[in-house]
Each structure stands twice: as C-alpha cells, then as structure tokens.
Amino acid sequence: MATTSGPRTGTGRITFFISLAVFAQESTWNLYDSQVPPLLREHLTSAALVGLLMGMDNLLGIFIQPWMGNRSDNTRTAWGRRIPYLVIGMPLAALLFLAIPHAAAALPALILVMFAYALTANSFKPVAESLLPDFIPPQRRSRANAVVKIASSLTVMVAALISIFLIDDFPAASFAIPAALMVASAAVLGVKLRDSRSPGYQAALAEDRARQGAASRRARVRDVVLDIVRDPDRSRLLLIVSILVFGGAWAASRALITPYGMETLGLSRGDAGGLTLPSGVAFIVAAYPVAVLAERFGRLRVMMAGMTVFAAGLVLGTVVHTPTGVVLGLCVAAAGASAFLVNAVVVLWNLAPSGGVVGTYTGLYTVGWVGGGFLGPAVVGGMVDLTNWSLMLVHVSILAVVAVLVVARVSALRRRSEAAHGSA
C-alpha cells in the first residue's frame, strides 16, 4: 500500500485547489456534452453518427489517460511532476473549447476541433486528480475526494444554467464562461501550488535516489498493468473489475432513464429526462458523510453497503411505479452510489505499491469507469430487449449486485493479506 512522507501540508487548502481544477475542467466537459450534439445535428441526421462522435472523448481517454498519468509520475521539475502539465494543458484546452462554436459552420472543422479538445483535456484530467494522493495522506483521502466529487457534481448545474439562460441568445459567448474558469484555475494553480513540495513527490525523489546505479528503471504503463495482472493477491485487478461493473450500472441508470420514463411512465421526453435531477442533489448531500463513514468503518465495507443501497433504491423505483416513486428510488440509489464513487479510487491509490505510480493508477481507474460507461448501457439495453422496459431498473440493480460480490472478494483478500503480514 502506498504511503507518503514529508512535511504536513494543509489538507483543506490543497483540497480547495484540486477541487477548483476539477470544477473548471468538468464545467467544460458538461457544457460540451449538452451543447455539442446540437452543433453536430446541424450537419448530420444520423443519431448514431452523432453518438459516435460524442463518444470519441471516452475512447481517447481509455488510451491517453493512463499514459499521461504515467508520464506525470515520471516527470521531475522545479514545479513538480503535475503542475507543468496543468499550466500548459488547461489554457490550451480552454482555447480549443472556445473555438468549438466558431468551427461549427463546417463539419470537418468542427470534428477537428472536437478531437483536439478531447485529446488535450483527456491528457491532463488524470494529472489534476493525481494531485490529491500526492498531498493528502491515505487516511484522509476519502474526505478530500468527497469534496472533489461535490465540486465535479456542481458543474452539471453550471452547465444547465448556461444552457437555460445564455446558450440561445449568446451561443458563442456561452462557451467562453467555462473556458475562462479553466484559464483562471490554471493561473491560480501555477501561482499558488508547487507539487514539488508534496509528500508524494518527495517520496518519488527518494525512490529515484534508491534506484541510482541499479538496473531498475521507472515503471511504464505496461509494467504497471502487468504487475497488477500477475499479482497472486488479485485485489487490485478485482477492484478495477468492480469499477468497470459498477461504472456500467451507474451509466445505464443515467443513459437509459429517459426512454424508461417515456416507455413505462408515459412521460414526455423532457419530463423523463428530468427524473435524475433530484438524485444529483442527493449525491452531493451524501458524498461527504459517506467519506467520514468510510474512514471510520473501512472503505470497502462502506462501498459494499453503498452499492447495496444503490440496488435497493432501483428496486424501490420499480415497485413504486410512479414518477414520484422513481425519483425517490433514484435519490436513494444516488446516495448509495456516492459511497463507491468517493472511495473506489482512494482504495486503488492506497493499494498502489508506491507513490511513484499513483498517476498511472488514476488513469487505470478512468479506464475501468469509462469502460463501464461504454458497456453498461449496452448490456442493460440487451437485457431490456429480452424482457421489457418495466424491468430496466432491476437489470441495473443486478449489475450492482455483481459489483458488490466482486468488492466482497477484494475485502476478503485484504483481510487475508493483513492477517498474513500483520499490516493494513
């Protein structure tokens, strides 16, 4: 399990800066997801093609994020190993994001700018998130990550407000607001934060000194993945599997809720799409308390309890088959899901063999989560085809139960390991 050493840094201050960086990044991503499809629809009539182009960023993320996380792990500068990528990448991504509505007149230009933005923004996403384990000690990471997740969730509301009040009258200027947030965030990070002072960076330098004159070299992504796959303990591999499975359940509960509401509740498209809005608030309210509970009772235990609550909420929404009942079930489910979303990456960080690979582990977490986001809606959609739409939420809960069983196995392996080695 990775540990850090070095002088204690104010966790509240560091958490604020990391949350600011994530908030700025996710503000652009959420507006991108909501407002780029209409720009594509001006040129394309095929919903499949629009969906394919909108999925391009997820596909790029699977390949780019682990590699860039690993690159930042192995970077050494006076500013540290993460900040240089952020102060360069965030303003560049902001400029590309700002160019999207101006490139929308021609489809080739729009696709080119979309690709460039997705490539750039995916490159520094794991870098920003990896600042948290660099600075925050393992025992406090759940609380810090809860604050980061809350900041990320708030960006959905920011994107919605921009869409409601500005996008129709000021379509190009609307893209400037998240872009400006990104540039301002990069400036604040560049001035106020030096991750060269972080315990994680100092531990990495100590590892470098220990390697001097030895035949060993810094780990590549391939080396890290092979270490996880070949480890007889299987804890890390199974945890990534659970991230993929629960990520699929979460994505399916979001992506398929609009047709579910239309098909089974007789709602309009707009009303069905709004079924998840209250659950976003429930997620924000629950995020910090589940972090505190995880630090007190154990992260894996709280994750399993939260996923069970997620599944129970979806069953509740199926049994109480009214719009109000579905909204209530989704709120219960989102509160439960927060236990997994806040703690899963923290467990993965803490299982890393050293602080020198946490950026790579952040990228691997994203691979699992994005992979689940790609496969989950398709798997649940196939189950709906075999049954009917009225059981869609139950099908999602089945995926969640599978994830619970996988995490239970991880928990058993960790207890066995701790008993054998006498350490956490």
Image (cartoon, helix red, strand yellow):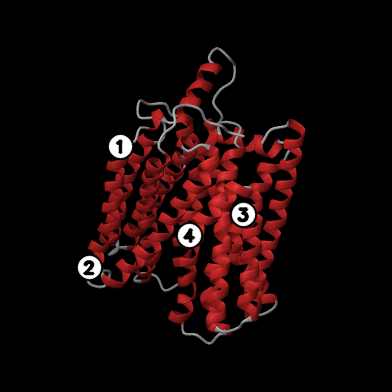
User: If you read the primary sequence from the N terminus, does the residue marked by circle 3 or circle 2 appear first?
Assistant: 2
Vertical placement of residue 16 versus 257, above or below: above
**What residue sits 53% from the left and 76% below the top?**
327
| Alpha carbon separation for disc pair 3 and 1 | 35 Å
Between circles 2 and 4, the one closer to the viewer is: 2
Q: Amino acid at mark 3?
A: Leu
Q: Circle 4 is placed at which residue position?
A: 55
Residue 148 numbered mark, or none: none
Q: Nearer the viewer, residue 175 or 419?
A: 419
| Alpha carbon separation for disc pair 4 and 3 | 17 Å
Between circles 4 and 1, the one closer to the viewer is: 1
Residue 244 numbered mark, or none: 3
| Alpha carbon separation for disc pair 3 and 2 | 39 Å
**Which quadrant, please, contains the C terminus?**
top right
Between circles 1 and 2, the one closer to the viewer is: 1
Crowding around mark 1 (Cα neighbors within 10 Å: few <14, some 14 to 19, many 20+) is: few
Q: Secondary structure at mark 3?
A: helix
Q: Circle 2 is placed at which residue position?
A: 170
User: If you read the primary sequence from the N terminus, does the residue marked by circle 2 or circle 4 appear first?
Assistant: 4
